[in-house]
Image (cartoon, rainbow, N blue to C red):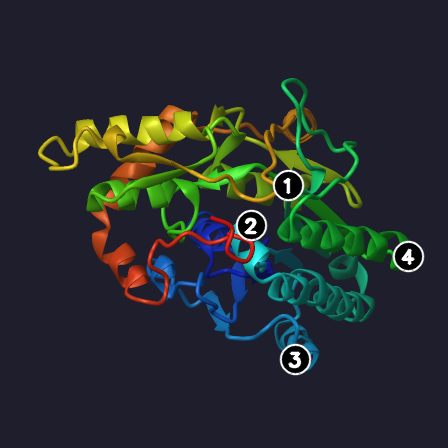
Amino acid sequence: MRKTILVTGGAGFIGSALLRHLLSRTEHAVVNVDKLTYAGNLDSLEPVLSDPRYTHEKVDICDAEEVARIFGRYRPDAVMHLAAESHVDRSIDGAAAFIQTNVVGTFTLLEAARAHWLGLEGEQRRSFRFLHVSTDEVYGSLGEEGYFTENTPYQPNSPYSASKAGSDHLVRAWHHTYGLPVLVTNCSNNYGPCQFPEKLIPVVILNALAGKSIPVYGKGDNRRDWLYVDDHVRALLTALERGEVGETYNIGGNNERSNLEVVQEICSLLDELVPDSRAAPHASLITFVTDRPGHDWRYAIDASKISGTLGWEPEENFDSGLRKTVLWYLENREWWERVLSGSYRLERLGLAGGVA
């Protein structure tokens, strides 16, 4: 059955992948609510911009009046809330925007969704869902062993993760207090095409192609579980369609690597795919830099709940997903050159007031 899905942050990295998936593989109509900050890029939505089922509302989710207008106009059957400030280093340099968007914006959206839901009747009210997309960083840092589960206590360690933890708690509170039918997902590190070039994998690719130094924090031994973005959006739609109201689902790729291993694998791929590069061997560009303040050492997701109860599994392993990602950046130079023509220049952020 065709539904209208309101997606916040649909011009971002994960949001654009979700919209491309929804409009190419389902019959749903999509309302993209995105104020187009530095990380919002309509170029990433080029394949769907002419689809009559697609609508873009350039609105800040903190603007209660405008958000209420959107709910009243489009009367969505579901909300998929991805809009967020999401880069740890930027949160270290300026936390205020993260509190405003991630906490205040989520509150504003919840209130509008609750008012809308209360006005629905019959099957539309019974089937309405509010899916909140969050991060594994809310759980803090792991030691050598163990995995984050849905029952892991929260222990956020950066302004970014603290703001996301706050938004998670608000969503659960609106369910338990008001009955709003919500779901929460917490994912591991995403990667893939169209990622804004401030995150590790695109920074490494683009610096290496330019023959610039590749910065690696500390010794490069911080570990992450990597999730290919298309696998993530399939999991989100699975949770929306089949998840149990009030439940949390952790989404991971079962691809744990150290940061240095990720960088080295990218360098090896570039040596293979760009053999005539004057920067080869690209691993010679690796430069170790002072670690990020409060850098969590290890994240790893136990995704057995969404796998066992909803039947979702990742389709990409890290080797296949990384090859697809590197090839995409090699084949889509125009996309990332347009991004880099703005204010972002692959500079290092998150120095916490000048720590060298």
Q: Earlier in the sequence, mark 1 or mark 4?
A: 1
* Image coordinates for residue 149, horizontal then vertical, percent: 72, 29
Residue that mark 2 sits on:
88
Q: Is residue 131 visible from the viewing direction of this image?
A: no
- Label 4 sits on residue: 177
Residue most extreme to the top: 145
Q: Is 42 left or right of 225, judged from the image as shown?
A: left
Q: Is residue 298 above or below residue 246?
A: above
What number is the disc on residue 69? Answer: 3
Left or right: 196 in relation to 62: left
Residue 202: x and y, percent?
Answer: 35, 44
Query: In this orientation, does residue 88 appear?
Result: yes
Q: Where is residue 256 in the image (x, y as percent from the top left)?
A: 51, 24
**Which amino acid type is shown beneath numbered disc 1?**
Glu
The CA distance from mark 1 to mark 2 is 10 Å
Task: Identify which residue, 135 or 218, lies in the foreground.
Answer: 218
Q: Between marks 2 and 3, how big is the CA–CA gap? A: 32 Å
The residue located at (26%, 35%) in the rendering is 285
Mark 2–mark 3 contact, CB under 8 Å? Answer: no
Mark 4 and mark 1 in contact (Cβ < 8 Å)? no
Q: What secondary structure is found at the residue carrying circle 1?
A: helix
Looking at the rendered image, the disc whose residue lies closer to the viewer, 1 or 3, is 1
Q: Nearer the viewer, mark 3 or mark 4?
A: 4
Label 3 vs 4, first from the N-terminus: 3
Q: Which of marks 2 and 4 is nearer the N terminus?
A: 2
Q: Which sits earlier in the primary sequence, circle 1 or circle 3?
A: 3
Determine which residue is flagged by label 1: 137
CA neighbours of label 2 inside 10 A, class few (<14), some (14 to 19), many (20+): many
